[in-house]
Image (cartoon, rainbow, N blue to C red):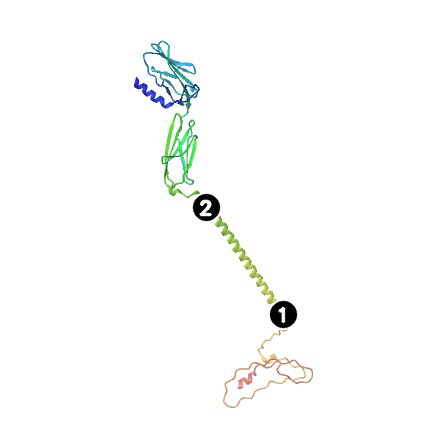
Amino acid sequence: MNLACEILASFLLIFIVPTKGEDPESTVVWGALDHDLILDIPGFQGSDTVADIQWNKNKEKIARIRKDKPLYNQMDKYVMFTNGTLKIKTLMRNDSDLYKVEVYNSNGVNLLSKTFDLKIQEMLSGPEINWTCTNRTVSCKVENGSDPTLELFLNKSTVQKGHQRLITYKWNTKWNKTFKCMAHNHVDKKVSMVTVMCPDEGLDLYLIIGICVGGVVLLIFVALLICYISRRKKQSHRRDDEQLEITAQKATLEERGRKPHQIPVSTPANPGMSQTPPVPGHRSQPPAHRPRPVGPRVQPQQKRLPPTPGTQVHQQKGPPLPKPRVQTKPPSDAEENS
């Protein structure tokens, strides 16, 4: 019997926290929603002098046991043991209230009186740990449960803590990391643990941004360079066209300026036909023939250049005649005889 009482007392200490409740002398007891709760009388040892033990909920009797009399339970929700321990089945939120136990002896003297302030909390879901390698961020989150407190550990050292459902942490190191997240409230405690492994730690976010910005700047520079080169080529082609046009205009002007002063000269195929026909009534002098040289045959000399037109002057009477062309070479007969 004493062993059972010790077990129940140790179990009760888990849920009992001595703080002030609505009653200045009450002890706050936390119960888990949808779970059973055992209320034990701390420091109470049964004896033959105890004759009456009764439990009240907010001054309403819910269970009682008296010496040599049957056990009294108001409803099946409450179960009272012979040592005075009270069990409340399947806690609901409306079970949160003040519970008081009183112990009397056979003479009706109050031997003990204790008040419990019962509070209900929902048990927690397991904390979920997520991480991102790109920005080196890890988070711990609890979906369900009442008033969770989260605590995040990195290699057994606390790095983040908060009375909330989500906490985050950003790390700076580049090696593998072991994170542990602990979530707890007054009735529950859950722990999750993961090892974060980022292959080669990926590319740093700032490095990625720098690469993108550098690429954009390079593309803009190349586009401007191409536009500049294209514009210079167009200007160069335009200058060349203008220079060619100016050169052509100058050539045209020079050609037009030379045309009135130039007399076209062409060597006729027959020298005899190239002479100007004589004016009627006048006879032109026949071309002189050189006598055949006597003696040994001499190598023919180089042909002399024809004299400038107008070197021969014909003395004739009458009006001036047009100047005949000077014969540029001897007649074909003279050449054959020589």
Q: Mark 2 points at which residue?
A: 210
Secondary structure beneath label 1? helix
The image shows residue 133 at horizontal and vertical percentages of 41, 40
Q: Which of 192 and 274 is in front in this view?
A: 192
Residue 12 position within the rendered picture, expressed as x and y whole percent measured from the top left? 36, 21
Q: Distance between the residues labelled 1 and 2?
A: 70 Å
Q: 157 or 150, which lies in front?
A: 157
Query: Residue 189: which quarter of the image?
Result: top left
Query: Label 2 amino acid?
Result: Gly
Labels 1 and 2: the sequence-earlier one: 2
Classify residue 234 as left or right of residue 11.
right
Q: Which residue lies furthest to the bottom in this view?
A: 295
Instruction: Identify the amino acid type marked 1.
Output: Gly
Identify which residue is drawn at 53% across, 84% down.
Answer: 336
Q: In this view, does 327 lie above or below 201?
A: below
x, y percent for residue 177: 37, 38
Q: Between residues 311 and 202, which one lies in front from this camera angle?
A: 202
The residue where tag 1 is placed is: 257
Residue 286 position in % (x across, y down): 61, 85
Image quadrant of residue 38?
A: top left
- Screen quadrant of the N terminus: top left
Identify the mark at residue 185; answer none if there is no mark. Answer: none
For discs 1 and 2, the disc positioned in front in the rendered view:
2
Position of residue 332 relative to residue 68, above or below, is below
| Pointer 2 local density, CA inside 10 Å: few below 14, some 14–19, many at least 20 | few
